[in-house]
Amino acid sequence: MSEFMGLIYGSYEAKADGFQPGGASLHSCMTPHGPDTTTFEKTIAEEDDAKPAKIKDTMAFMFESSLIPRITPWVLKSPHLDNDYYKCWTGLKSHFHHEHLPENGELHS
């Protein structure tokens, strides 16, 4: 699934480190994406204390498609292109604990 997301006003809770109003992101099919490192680590630290919360004073949108969007040369030459976008995941640590696997190492649903 490809995903195009934009922020109209306010702040975007999954990108606490600087997704600005008027900004947008595009993640093509099979491209890893998700909350930035700061947001993810804060959420993991809450563990069982996380509760539903109403998000106010913001408006964002997201379109998903099974199609792969084509990027135009105009977009790639934009002075507003964030060439450092990928850095929001720098420092992301693994929270996978192999000791929770069964002895034979197989996972079952």
Image: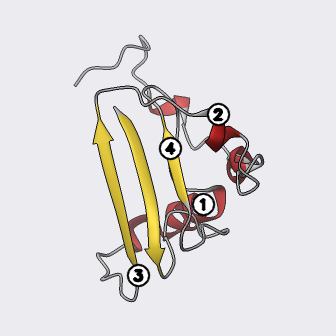
Identity, as a three-letter code, of the amino acid under mark 2:
Pro
Q: Position of residue 15 (x, y in %)?
A: 57, 64
Residue in the picture at 40% in, 81% down: 58
Q: CA distance from mark 1 to mark 2?
A: 36 Å
Callout 4: SS = strand
Q: Which is nearer the N-term, disc 1 or disc 3?
A: 1
Residue in the picture at 45% in, 25% down: 30
Residue in the picture at 60% in, 56% down: 36
The correct choice, above or below, for 60 with respect to 27 in the image is below
Identity, as a three-letter code, of the amino acid under mark 4:
Leu
Residue 74 visible in the current orientation: yes
Q: Which residue is mark 2?
A: 73
Q: Nearer the viewer, residue 22 or 91?
A: 22
Tell me, yes or no, whether the two marked residues, 2 and 3, touch with CB atoms within 8 Å: no
Q: Which is nearer the N-term, disc 1 or disc 4?
A: 4
Callout 3: SS = loop
Q: Seen from this angle, which residue lies furthest front?
A: 74
- Tell which tag, 1 or 2, sits nearer the viewer: 2
Q: CA distance from mark 4 to mark 2?
A: 15 Å
Residue in the picture at 77% in, 49% down: 84
Q: Which is nearer the N-term, disc 4 or disc 2?
A: 4
Q: Which residue is mark 4?
A: 26
Q: Seen from this angle, which residue lies furthest bottom?
A: 57
Q: CA distance from mark 4 to mark 3?
A: 20 Å
Identity, as a three-letter code, of the amino acid under mark 1:
Glu
Q: Which residue is mark 1?
A: 41
Q: Position of residue 79 (x, y in %)?
A: 76, 54
